[in-house]
Amino acid sequence: FPYRATFDIECMLKDTNYPRSDKVEYTNEHELVSISVCSNVEGFDEAKCFVLEKEDGQRALVKQFVDYLLQISETSAMLMKDKYDDYIEQIADSPLQDKFDNYLNQLPVLS
């Protein structure tokens, strides 16, 4: 598949007050602070960084990241459909159409 996206997540260590046991003591936990994304899809080939804007805003940060990946994926699918338009017409209404459509709509995402 010619297109892909990559990401990197950065966390900070935050002190915890989790109860300890005889065998385990939790001293810190990882807390998400940023996610960087880049791809080789036209229009999305510059790195974009999503940074935590407020404490306890991790859910919003992850939503921004996933929404951005969906935009990249939609653009990738459009480019792939344009590239294979002649083949798509040839297999219309055949059992291969759904499989090929699934292939065209995927975006491998690597960390």
Image (spheres, grey):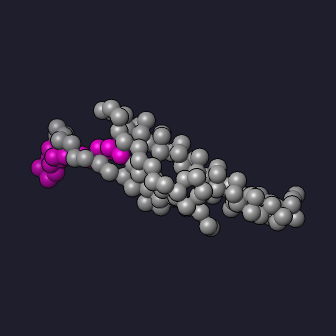
Residue furthest left as drawn: 22
When the figure is inspected, residue 74 is found, relative to residue 53, above or below; the finding is: below
Q: Nearer the viewer, residue 22 or 99?
A: 99
Residue sitting at x 44%, y 42%: 62
Give residue 75's position: percent from left, percent from top: 64, 51
Q: Quadrant of residue 97?
A: bottom right
Q: Position of residue 64 (x, y in %)?
A: 48, 40
Decide whether residue 27 is among the magenta residues: yes
33 with respect to 102 (left or right): left
- In the visual, does 6 lie left or right of 56? right
Q: How many numbered discs, if any?
A: 0
**Which residue appears at 33% of the width and 32% of the height?**
54
The residue drawn where x is 16% and y is 51% is 24
- Asked whether, in this view, residue 19 is left or right of residue 99, the answer is left
- Residue 55 image position (x, y, % from top left): 30, 32
Task: Specify whether residue 98 is in view.
Answer: yes
State the residue at coordinates (54%, 49%). 69
Task: Tell me if 1 is positioned left or right of 55 in this view.
Answer: right
The verdict on residue 60 being magenta is no
21 versus 88 height, above or below: above
